[in-house]
Amino acid sequence: MSAVLIDGNALSRELRADVAMRAARLKARGVTPGLAVVLVGDNPASQVYVRNKVKACEDSGLHSVLEKYDADLSEAALLARVDALNNDPAIHGILVQLPLPAHIDAQKVIEAISPAKDVDGFHIASAGALMTGMPGFWPCTPYGCMKMLESIGYELKGKHAVVIGRSNIVGKPMALMLLQQNATVTICHSGTRDLGALTRQADVIVAAVGKRNVLTADMVKPGAVVIDVGMNRNDEGKLCGDVDFAGVREVAGWITPVPGGVGPMTITMLLVNTLEAAERGL
């Protein structure tokens, strides 16, 4: 029997409707949640991501400002723009689109963003808040994954979750969020011996390494929940994830598709974080 699909598009629509309703309440009080998106250079993928983020803001009643700069923008000039946005009361969230040109220290730029406006959840203060269970902004992709698990009513307490990937953007924060829900968490990576031996024990698997078919049907316990964070291209040039979808869906209990799974949720949680930043500022 095929796995139940966890539809990221449908869940996103629900959450964005809630964002629009809350944004309207804030507007009635004279506050329009505002997101500033800063793009340096002409990376084609970044341009698509930025366009989608700005449109999502506008569709949900949020104010968005897109600042585009040439690839030769100096690090000092970019830091100065971030500082100005930190001090702009109309801006509640700041997102500097990655990757940045090689001459700019991305971490320095991220750390220059005020933690109160760090809606990407990448600042060290945000990471520390997640680590210690304090209020802060969660990185959007793993936050979206948690919302997907919540949407199917999945009880994580006591379950074994395996996270494939240890990036600061997805893998590590994903593991911490699962821990907060009392799952037992194993983090796997390029140095892991016998990945399949670990994934076959898992009730929940989150694949987030950016490598096609890192998870195949023989590596999945029947009935497991499989969350596919990967964004790759197959031999025909079509978008695909890290999971062998056709095979794994015949074994898993629930699975996220690519496209239409985690992707839309990432932008949705950016809207949620921006809205919450505006609410916290009242």
Image (tube, rainbow, N blue to C red):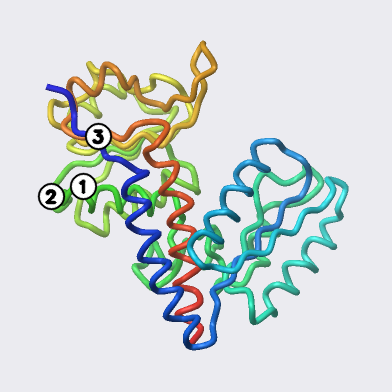
Is residue 86 left or right of 171 when viewed as pictured? right
| Between discs 2 and 3, the one toward the N terminus | 3
Q: Which residue type does callout 1 highlight?
A: Thr
| Between discs 1 and 3, the one toward the N terminus | 3
Q: Distance of mark 2 from mark 3, alpha carbons?
A: 23 Å
* x 37%, y 51%: residue: 12
Q: Nearer the viewer, residue 24 or 212?
A: 24
Q: Nearer the viewer, residue 130 or 267?
A: 267
* x 42%, y 27%: residue: 241
Q: Which residue type does callout 2 highlight?
A: Gly
Q: How many marks?
A: 3
Compared to residue 255, the image places residue 100 above or below, namely: below
- Report which quarter residue 49 is drawn in: top right
Q: Nearer the viewer, residue 177 or 87?
A: 87
Question: Which structural element holds mark 2?
Answer: loop
The residue to which callout 3 is attached is 5
* x 82%, y 57%: residue: 75
Compared to residue 43, the image places residue 127 above or below, namely: below
- Tell me the mark number nearer the camera, choosing from 2 and 3: 3
The residue to which callout 2 is attached is 158
Q: Which residue type does callout 3 highlight?
A: Leu
The residue to which callout 1 is attached is 184
Q: Nearer the viewer, residue 17 or 45?
A: 17
Question: Which structural element holds mark 3?
Answer: strand
- Tell me the mark number nearer the camera, choosing from 1 and 3: 3
Q: Distance of mark 1 from mark 3, alpha carbons?
A: 24 Å
Q: Distance of mark 2 from mark 1, alpha carbons?
A: 6 Å
Q: Are marks 1 and 3 in contact (CB under 8 Å)?
A: no
Q: Are marks 2 and 1 in contact (CB under 8 Å)?
A: yes
How many residues crowd around disc 3 within 10 Å: few (fewer than 14), some, or many (20 or more)?
A: some
- Report which quarter residue 220 is drawn in: top left
Is residue 16 left or right of 168 when viewed as pictured? left
